[in-house]
Image (cartoon, rainbow, N blue to C red):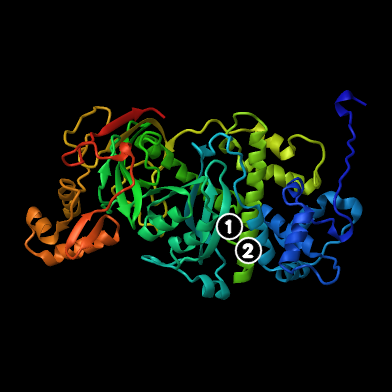
Amino acid sequence: MSRHCATAVFTRVVTVAEGVFAPGHLGELTQHVPFELVDDVLVRTRTVEQRLRRLPSRVGVYFLLALVLFPSLGYARVWDKLVAGLRPLNVKRPSEKALRDLRRRLGPAPLKLLFETLAGPVARPTTPGVCYRRWRTVALDGCSSIKAPDQPRVVGWLGKILRPNGWDGYPMLRLMALCETGTRALLGAAFGPTNCGEAGYAVRLLPLLSKDMLLLADRGFDSNDFLTRVADTGAQLLIRLNGRRTPAVMATLPDGSFLTRINSLTLRVVEADITVTCDDEQRITNRYLLATTLLDHRTDPAATLVRLYHERWEVESAFYTLRHTLLDGLVLRSCDPFGIAQELWAQLTLYQILRRAMAEAAETTIGVNPDRVSFTVALEAARDQLITAESVLPGTPGPGVIAQAALAALLPKRRTPISARKVKSALSRYPGNPADARSLTSQNITHLAIAIYAAHPSTPTTDTSTPATPPVSGRQGRRDHTLQLLRTDDQRAWSLKEIADALGIEHYRSLCAQLGHWVTDGILSRTGRGLYALQPMALNATTRPTSKDDGFASPIHHLTTRP
């Protein structure tokens, strides 16, 4: 026999559960969701089988998770994957009806409890990219592009959205997630019909916040009530405000930010222009108005907070992974509300298991950022391990096959690209922005400039490296004029007539109503009938106004850097 035709024989030992429980596994991922955990979840949700069947409830849980690993395959094909490495056991294939009945018998409760058990931060605080100072950064956002089957029971639950060009083809599901930005792992999730706003689902996730977290959120979560609820949890916040809002300027800080009061909550506001220069020499500018509970400008400079807010987009990457990488862009397979809930909880559970495995892989090598671990590589390795039924139980110490595959194919250090949100389909439900002249393809950022706007600077400065926009924020109105007036003598109470005469207001009634609103907001205090004074603020010396005259003498600050 030629040496080119030589053969090699490999033997392997597969260790799985005994008897009818043998198909209940996820390959190496079983180590992150062991038999004992699944059995405990089944007991707590009262879904353990009353008599031992050919398809026990534990096998059903693992089968549901395997359905998520292979979204394009039917029940029988997924079962074949589960038992492909168990051929010596001669496991009989159940009918598809038996597998459907198994799903109905379990319901969504076990998968929901399993996800809630596994959800939470998965990386150590010392892992690169996980924390800002002593706070773990988390992001909150919603996704409403998950498609459910167009079936009567599903439409009755989710409904359809009427667009300018007609009704949506599929019912859409709204998914709200709280994500750890450093690893994109989920701390919690909620979902339901799209007729309920994102803030309604987000409130359900606020109890998951803790004092060691910093919440990043978009301007859809900037309502006064929501900001107060987040602050009540003890967590810090950095949330973008709607550009139409005009927070009251209570005191300005040297870095251009200012203090305000919203619902009697003291916040610091940063207004900045971000200008990026792309590979094609195109410059794009956008203005951001950020509110935060980090009040000290020395430890948390305004420009640092503006850069930190970019971490909020990690939750969008998590949604992309759920929709396109894990679900492969397909429509959910279940045709009734209970089945959809069960399928979503199984998908979120498997996603969290993979994120845990990826975080553990990154932490085995010093200095590796978890966002360099490829989700696709980890997913394919997990599928291979399930088919061969390898490493179901913990074996030799050290990185497993999934971790080795992930570390062998680390992604390069992340670049800073920009991409326009443009309509590529004529029938898209998104109208698009005709004024947006950006390319449809992503462009790398070659230069980044951040211009911090002072509340009301006295003397503007110029910098040729920043956009030629006026540095004054232009937010001064009657409220700010009133605050400036009261600051000229903040040791006494001012009458309504004095305030109106000083501001040149003839109609007292409208001013009286506005003063009442500002008292409710915690900006002013009512000391007597028709008497008003500045609300005292518990501030240290670093947060006092920088000028004794009007409190608005802080200059504009420019920061120009390269990414």
Which numbered disc covers residue 333?
Answer: 2
Q: Report which quarter residue 478 is drawn in.
A: bottom left
Q: Is residue 112 above or below residue 281?
A: below
| Viewer-side residue, 138 vs 293 | 293
Q: Secondary structure at mark 1?
A: loop
Identify residue type, mark 1. Leu
Q: Does residue 554 appear anywhere in the picture?
A: yes
Kindly check if marks 2 and 1 are in contact, taking CB atoms under 8 A apart as contact: yes
Q: Residue 139 placed where, x, y %?
A: 48, 48
Q: Residue 4 vs residue 367: left or right?
A: right
User: Label 2: few (<14), some or many (≥20) within 10 Å?
Assistant: some
In the rendered structure, which amino acid carries the disc numbered 2? Arg
User: Left or right of 487: which side holds 427?
Assistant: right
At label 1, counting other C-alpha atoms closer than 10 Å, the crowd grade (few under 14, some 14-19, many 20 or more) is: some
Q: Nearer the viewer, residue 277 or 95?
A: 277
What residue do we see at 48% from left, 61% from top? 203
Q: Nearer the viewer, residue 95 or 558?
A: 558
- Is 369 on the left or on the right of 164, as rendered? right
For image coordinates 39% across by 46% down, the residue present is 293
In the rendered image, residue 422, in percent from the top left (x then y), is placed at 38, 49
Instruction: Give the label on residue 330, or none.
Output: 1
Residue 285 x/y as whole percent: 30, 39
The answer to which quarter of the image holds residue 394 is: top right
The residue located at (27%, 28%) in the rendering is: 465
For residue 542, side relative to residue 76 (left or right):
left
Assign a secondary structure to mark 2: loop
Answer whether residue 289 is visible to the viewer in this image: no
Query: In the rendered image, which quarter is residue 498 located in?
Result: bottom left
> Residue 150: where, in percent of width, then height?
55, 69
Foreground: 111 or 280?
111
How many numbered marks have been drawn onto this rendered protein structure?
2
